[in-house]
Image: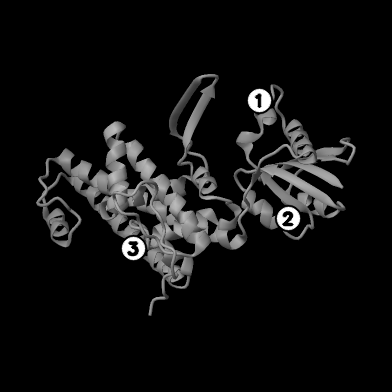
Amino acid sequence: MHFVGLDYHTKSSYVSILDEHNEEIWNGRLESSSELADFLKGLDDAKVLFEAGYGWPRLAKMLDDTGVELTMCHPEHNRRIATDRRKSDRRDARNLAVYLKTDGYKKAYMPGADIRDERQLIRSQIHMSWGVTRLKNQIHSLLAYAGVSKESFNIFTKRSREYLETVELPEYTRQVLDAKIELYDFTKDLLKRIESIVAELNRSDPDARLLKTIPGVGDITARVILSEIGDISRFESDDSLACYSGLTQREYQSSETRRTMGITKEGSSDLRWVLIQAAWIAIRFDPALREFYERIEARKNARVAICAVAHKLVKAVWHILTEKIPYKAKKPEAKGKPAVARGKAVASPS
């Protein structure tokens, strides 16, 4: 058995190979991805460990047919590499090989090619929606700078847009405003195209329809949850999924001292963001969640309270996807977390 530590970069990589006796039998730099693939193909019975980072999907795709067992680990858990006072590619590769040989690493999830491709679609939608919000804020700011009074709260309605096109502005202010409005319209059209693709995916996916029974979860949010989680069976409990979402509280304890702090913010930031956005809507339609939110807000603040609601939602997600049942909240007077009804799955739309 060969234990291979791979310090991967897009232009070159450093490789360290240990044998079963923990002896380094080879180390060196490979200058191209094709050279790396050819090199690994020549190894018999090899395991490869590399750190998650930029370009890892390209590496996984490239090494699919090499026959090696490819494993990815979390960089933040590799203390020996992070704190090494003489850090180099060679030492990093050697440390990864040692981790692999001694099983001293935390394995990172490597989704399949279909999930990786879907994530690109969904993440692009999220980032473009943020871009639309930024453009709207910039247009509001530009109008305020020019001293233009807005006829209504929403300046992006058809009637308000006609007003913006005719209002008198200085020459350069008009050019900037027209450019931002044109960019806003273009981005909105792209978003509509992506949203139609996502809606089509959800129509044929029973898990997405189940998730949409959660108040505040629509087509995009459901798709983000599914693509970011991947295989739900890799989470043994609702607590483990909550930890992955980064919505659990950090805790510090030493002797008699114990403190709870903010959320860990580990895992997928996109998953955490959509759950928090869904929580704001959920407290409007779910009386039990609203009561829970108000109880925590009275003791803490709105931000802490909404994160606590999102924490309940992510636990409900685990039960929904694991047990294939729709969401149903408890009554407001009931204690504990929102429940999911044990019953039949959501029927397919006609």
Q: How many marks?
A: 3
Residue indicated by mark 3:
189
N-terminal of the two: label 2 or label 1?
2
Q: Is residue 23 left or right of residue 153?
A: right
- Give the residue type that dot 3 points to: Asp
N-terminal of the two: label 3 or label 1?
1
In the picture as drawn, the residue positioned furthest to the front comes out as: 334
Residue 11 visible in the displayed image? no
- Spatial CA span between label 3 and label 1: 47 Å
- Label at residue 83: 1
> Which residue is found at the position 72% from the left and 33% from the top?
92
> Which residue is found at the position 44% from the left and 54% from the top?
316
> Which residue is found at the position 63% from the left and 49% from the top?
56
Q: Is residue 306 left or right of residue 99?
A: left
Q: Position of residue 341 (x, y in %)?
A: 41, 62
> Which residue is found at the position 49% from the left and 58% from the top?
226
Residue 36 visible in the displayed image? yes
> Dot 2, how many residues are within 10 Å of its Cα: few (below 14), some (14-19), or many (20+)?
many
Residue indicated by mark 2:
63
> Measured along the vertical axis of the image, is residue 283 above or below residue 121?
above
**Quadrant showing the C terminus:** bottom left
Foreground residue among 127 and 299: 299
Q: Position of residue 36 (x, y in %)?
A: 77, 49
Q: Position of residue 213 (x, y in %)?
A: 37, 63
- Spatial CA span between label 2 and label 1: 29 Å
- Give the residue type that dot 1 points to: Thr
- Give the residue type that dot 2 points to: Leu
N-terminal of the two: label 3 or label 2?
2
Nearer the observer: mark 3 or 1; the answer is 1
Secondary element type, mark 1 = loop
Nearer the observer: mark 3 or 2; the answer is 2
